[in-house]
Amino acid sequence: MRARAVFTFLSLVAFSNHAVAADAAPKTEPEAAERAPPPPETSDRALAGAAAVVPGVVVHGMGHYAAGETTTGNRLLLAEGIGLGLVFGAGTAIVTTGASRYVVGPGAATVILGIGLFGTSFLADVYGSASPDSAAAGRRTRPPAWVETELGYRHISDPIFQYQDFVVESVSMRSGRLRLTPSGWFSLGADNARYRIEGAYRFLGRTPSVADRPAMNDHLDAVLGMVHHRYSTERFTRSSMELVVDTRYDLGHVGQTLRGAFVEAGVGYSFGRIDYDIQGIEVPADFDDLLLARFGFGAVFRGESNPGSEARVYYDHRHDDFAGGLLTRGLPSGVAGHFGIEARWFFTPALGLGVEAQVGSAFLTGLSVLFRQSGPGPAGDERRSN
């Protein structure tokens, strides 16, 4: 299932309809200066794409070597080596210390980072080898919106969790480097609700006050979140607080053929408390803590969509949300987190749709309507300024 999702994702991004034609508008001076070499012929892309898969699945960067992009191929191969080194190094530390509680947390986070780096170098090679026009993808950047709202529906298929249908609402507001995002999930069939409020500070990256189109969409944020999940029928609640360092890195820094692609990563810690409300019985609260880690690969859409339209595949290590941990056979079942794929498509500068799917111990699907307002105030032609 995951392999099919990744293939579909790459196909949507690299071969979206009108990818080249819609971005063939006249360039400004700055755009002409950063223009990539002409896109390769279709037959050359097919050969490079095939090399990126076989033998590229073992030696990352083979697609770029076949396309003559030796420097980018070397960087992807180096990323593969670093990823493997992180996995084996941290894994060895965990095993040799007997999974010591002082080592297993940082070690597990390092393993997840290494696996993410290994997977990203492979997906980046496939993307860069198959993408028909990286220069067009590079022009799809935009500053973040100062306000964005979401109203959607989520369906959860879980043999244990009896609540299946949820309405999802959120509002994300930015002021300079600060962001505040309250959100909620509300069950349609019972008194079950999950509330979350999130505050973030942007140390590096663009803010809504930027009027011109940023060259890259990199950022580094510190995120503080609080969650309260109410199970009224079951008569208990869970509340938690978390701190996460979240980052996004534009792969255009690695090579021109990778413009439009990006990686996202986050690592943090969550501390939770479970309170019980059982009539006539006093039950002490339970406490838990979680390692939070996330790694994803994404790319922007081109063609008829507006800037800000993009898709990503990701792995999320957290176990306290609706998808939970991945079920497998044997002892490792539930140890891993869940996998997901999501996409956002804006039909106008302000209005769009979002879709997502997650698979862990449960299967989650959803659809949302998105609305955003960009810039410090009303602007002119957003397509031209972003």
Image (spheres, rainbow, N blue to C red):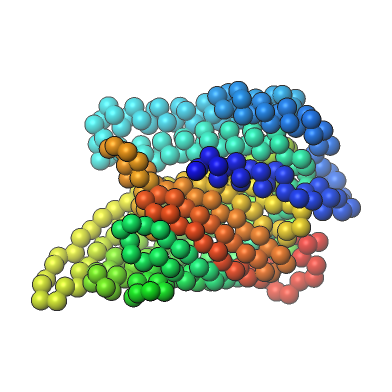
Q: Quadrant of residue 322?
A: bottom left
| Residue in the picture at 55% in, 24% down | 58
Q: Nearer the viewer, residue 218 or 183?
A: 183
**Residue 151 seen in render:** yes
- With 332 as the anchor, is 281 left or right in this view? left
| Residue in the picture at 47% in, 35% down | 115
Q: Nearer the viewer, residue 194 or 374?
A: 194
Q: Residue 208 placed where, x, y %? A: 65, 65
- With 244 as the anchor, is 144 left or right in this view? right
Q: Is residue 259 above or below residue 98?
A: below
Q: Is residue 259 above or below residue 65?
A: below
Q: Is residue 386 above or below residue 27?
A: below
The quadrant of the image that shows the C terminus is bottom right
Q: Residue 19 placed where, x, y %? A: 77, 49
- With 250 as the anchor, is 349 left or right in this view? right
| Residue in the picture at 10% in, 72% down | 281
Q: Total number of numbered labels?
A: 0
Q: Residue 169 placed where, x, y %? A: 50, 71
- With 256 as the anchor, is 191 left or right in this view? left
Q: Nearer the viewer, residue 40 or 382?
A: 40
Q: Nearer the viewer, residue 244 or 354?
A: 354
- Farthest right residue? 26
Q: Residue 329 placed where, x, y %? A: 32, 38
| Residue in the picture at 56% in, 66% down | 368
**Residue 69 seen in render:** no
Q: Is residue 52 above or below residue 220?
A: above
